[in-house]
């Protein structure tokens, strides 16, 4: 009888443990990968791409991967990291976080590009979105408060009809070309190597207007050192709620929203892409992640792999005529 009783007790205890395990949250389950996972981004440490990458890596560690590290591989305006990522092992251990412009605009800009948007990469999902702030400094008269007033002033002062951007071939560059074309105006584009040096020239009055990632403009706008004439989203930015959009400013076709999105090499198995996508979406539910993203001027945005793939296709198609109309191309 004692053996029977012991056996029953063992079965009952084992059943209880199984039920308890079934009730544990998903975070307690073993990570998908026990191998070291690499999250690549093509920009230097400290910028918004780096911040978003590290927030995601922190939340994927212990859920998707036992260990995950962020690797900054700046160069080529964000192209170099994509050239490297496309040939990485397609087993879910290498992923790249990039602004979508590198996949939707650059193919129309560069005659020789070391990757193909649709052949080389699979979308995992979006992490965040950001818009352009059309920003004026002391180089533009203080009485000018709107985009239209700036363009009118530029026509009257052709020697000063210029704007800066963080680099040629970016969405910020083409915001300026769209405004110039619509206004039948010649605007001299001054490309910089990143937003930081451009903002310094804006503050110093060396360039009158700059197309600035909103996160780089907010602090200076709030302090009164710079003024934002408009933002390029479909609706007003929560970071500058009193600033009109370009649509509200009378330029309905000048809309530019970029995404920070996660991609893997194209031959990564579909089930692995879905697991990584699910882990990413779960990571983005964290309020700390949302709040930290807000500090660098980006809005949390979560999508499925299929939704992100559709966004890439749409942006790729919409930027093609804009780049063509600008007449701009780059050799390298």
Image (tube, helix red, strand yellow):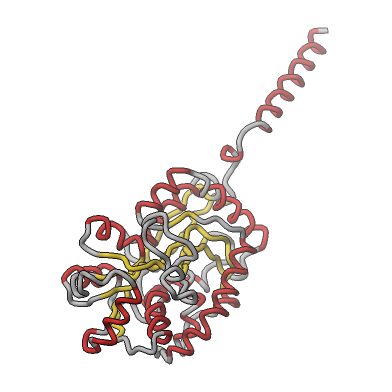
Q: In which quarter of the image is residue 148?
A: bottom left
Of 40 and 315, nearer the camera is 315
Residue under the image location 30 percent in, 72 percent down? 194
| x and y percentages locating residue 307 in the rendered image | 62, 63
Of 150 and 307, nearer the camera is 150
Residue under the image location 58 percent in, 61 percent down? 124
Relative to 208, say whether 257 is above or below.
above
Q: Quadrant of residue 185?
A: bottom left
**221 to the left or right of 319:** left
Relative to 75, say whether 300 is above or below.
above
Relative to 17, say whether 279 is above or below.
below
| x and y percentages locating residue 278 in the rendered image | 60, 52
Residue under the image location 43 percent in, 74 percent down? 250
Q: Residue furthest top?
A: 1
User: Where's the N terminus, which quadrant?
Assistant: top right
Q: How many labels does the image show?
A: 0
| x and y percentages locating residue 86 in the rendered image | 52, 73
Q: Residue furthest left?
A: 204
Q: In which quarter of the image is residue 122?
A: bottom right
| x and y percentages locating residue 127 in the rendered image | 50, 57
User: Where's the C terminus, which quadrant?
Assistant: bottom left
């Amino acid at each position: 009888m004692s053996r029977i009783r012991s056996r029953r007790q063992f079965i009952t205890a084992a059943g209880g443990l199984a039920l308890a395990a079934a009730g544990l949250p998903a975070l307690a389950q073993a990570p998908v990968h026990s191998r070291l996972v690499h999250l690549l981004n093509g920009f230097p440490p400290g910028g918004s791409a780096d911040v978003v990458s590290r927030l995601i890596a922190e939340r994927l560690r212990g859920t998707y991967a036992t260990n995950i590290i962020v690797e900054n591989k700046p160069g080529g305006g964000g192209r170099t990291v994509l050239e490297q990522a496309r040939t990485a092992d397609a087993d879910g251990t290498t992923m790249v976080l990039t602004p979508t412009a590198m996949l939707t605009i650059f193919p129309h800009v560069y005659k020789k590009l070391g990757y193909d948007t649709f052949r080389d990469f699979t979308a995992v999902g979006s992490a965040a979105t950001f818009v352009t702030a059309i920003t004026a400094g002391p180089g533009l008269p203080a009485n000018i408060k709107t985009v239209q007033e700036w363009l009118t002033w530029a026509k009257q002062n052709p020697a000063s009809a210029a704007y800066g951007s963080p680099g040629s071939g970016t969405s910020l560059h083409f915001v300026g070309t769209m405004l110039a074309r619509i206004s039948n105006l010649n605007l001299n584009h001054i490309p910089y190597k990143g937003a930081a040096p451009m903002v310094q020239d804006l503050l110093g009055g060396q360039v009158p207007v700059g197309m600035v990632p909103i996160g780089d403009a907010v602090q200076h706008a709030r302090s009164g050192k710079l003024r934002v004439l408009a933002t390029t989203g479909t609706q007003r930015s929560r970071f500058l709620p009193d600033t009109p959009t370009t649509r509200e400013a009378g330029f309905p076709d000048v809309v530019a929203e970029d995404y920070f999105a996660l991609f893997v090499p194209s031959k990564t198995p579909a089930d692995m892409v879905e697991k990584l996508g699910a882990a990413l979406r779960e990571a983005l539910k964290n309020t700390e992640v949302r709040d930290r993203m807000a500090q660098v001027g980006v809005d949390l945005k979560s999508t499925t792999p299929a939704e992100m793939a559709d966004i890439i296709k749409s942006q790729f198609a919409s930027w093609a005529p804009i780049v063509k109309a600008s007449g701009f191309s780059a050799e390298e």
